[in-house]
Image (cartoon, rainbow, N blue to C red):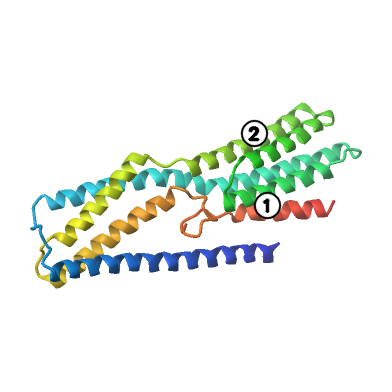
Amino acid sequence: MIACAEQLETDSDSRSWVRRVWFFIRMSLVLLSIVAGKILVHRMSWEVLAPNPLFPALVASEVFLLGFLLNGVLMDYKESEKIPGELAAALECLAMEVRSVRELHPEAEMKGALALLAGFSEDLLAWMNDGGLVTGLLNRLDELQLVISRLGIWNAAPLQARLLLGLANIRRVVVRIEVIRETTFVPAVYWMAYAGTGFLTGGLVLTDIEPFGESLFFIGVISFLLIKLLLLIADLDNPFAAGHAISVENVSLLPVALAVERLKRLVEAG
C-alpha cells in the first residue's frame, strides 16, 4: 500500500512538472512574439501612440479585473482542495459500515455490495481524472444505493440511516464537482479581462517609449505578468481538469486513489 501510494504521488508530480515546463515554453513563445512585434513596429516607424497620463489608468483597471477574477476562482479552488479527502473518507466509512453488518449478521452476504462499491470508486476516480459525462457515474451510484437499501432487512434503523446519509454526501459532492467543471466564473468579466489585456499589450507595442531598450524590458515584463495571470485564472477555474494536457494547476486526487486501492484489497480479502 505504501509503495502504491508513493508510485501514485510520483506519477502525479511527474505529470505536473512536464505540464509546467510546457506552459513556460508556450509563455516564452508568446513573450518573444510580443517583443518581436515591438521591434518590428519600432523599425517600421509604426509607433502611432504617445505616452499619456491615462495609460496608468488602463493598467490599474486591468489589474482590478484580474484581481476580481482571481479572488473568485480561488474560493472555488480552496473548496475543491477539500473534496478528494471528503470523498475518500466517505467511501471508506461506507465500506466499514457495510462490513459491520456482517459482524452482527454472519449469514448476510456483503461481498457483492463491497464489490459494487469498489467498482463505483474506480469509476469515480477515472471520471475525476478524465472528465466526461456524469450520467454514467450517477447511474452506477443509483445501482449502489439500491443494493445498500436492501441491507435494511439486516440493519438497525440508525445504521441504515448512516449508510444512506453517506451515499447522499457522495452524490452531493459528485454533483458539486460537475457544477465546478461546467460553470465559468462570471464570463462577462472574463471577456473584459481578455479584451483589456489585448488592448493594453497592443497599446504598449504601438506607443513610442524612449529609451527603446528599456521599453522592451518593461513591455515584456508587463505583458508576461498579465498574460500569465490571465491563463492561471482560467486554469484555476477548473481544478478537476487533470485529464486535460494543457491544465497545470489541479487538486490532488491521491486520497481518492488510496481509498480505491484499500477498497480493492478489502474485496480481494473477502
Q: Give whichever of 44, 12 is nearer the camera.
A: 44
Which corner quadrant of the image does residue 210 belong to? Answer: bottom left
Q: Quick one: which residue is furthest to the right in this view? A: 107
Drawn side of residue 245 relative to residue 197, left or right: right
Q: Which mark is on residue 168?
A: 2
Q: Quick one: which residue is furthest to the front in this view? A: 44
**How dense is the environment of label 2, judged by Cα within 10 Å: few (below 14), some, or many (20 and up)?**
some
Q: Residue at left 58%, top 52%?
A: 130
Going by the numbered disc 2, the residue's amino acid type is Ala
Q: Position of residue 12 (x, y in %)?
A: 56, 62
Q: Give whichever of 120, 32 is nearer the camera.
A: 32
Q: Residue at left 73%, top 48%?
A: 119
Q: Give whichever of 55, 8 is nearer the camera.
A: 55
CA–CA distance in space, label 2 to label 1: 18 Å
Q: Give whichever of 143, 151 is nearer the camera.
A: 143
Q: Residue at left 21%, top 46%?
A: 61
Going by the numbered disc 1, the residue's amino acid type is Ala
Q: Which residue is mark 1?
A: 259
Say which element carries label 2: helix
Which corner quadrant of the image does residue 173 belong to? Answer: top right
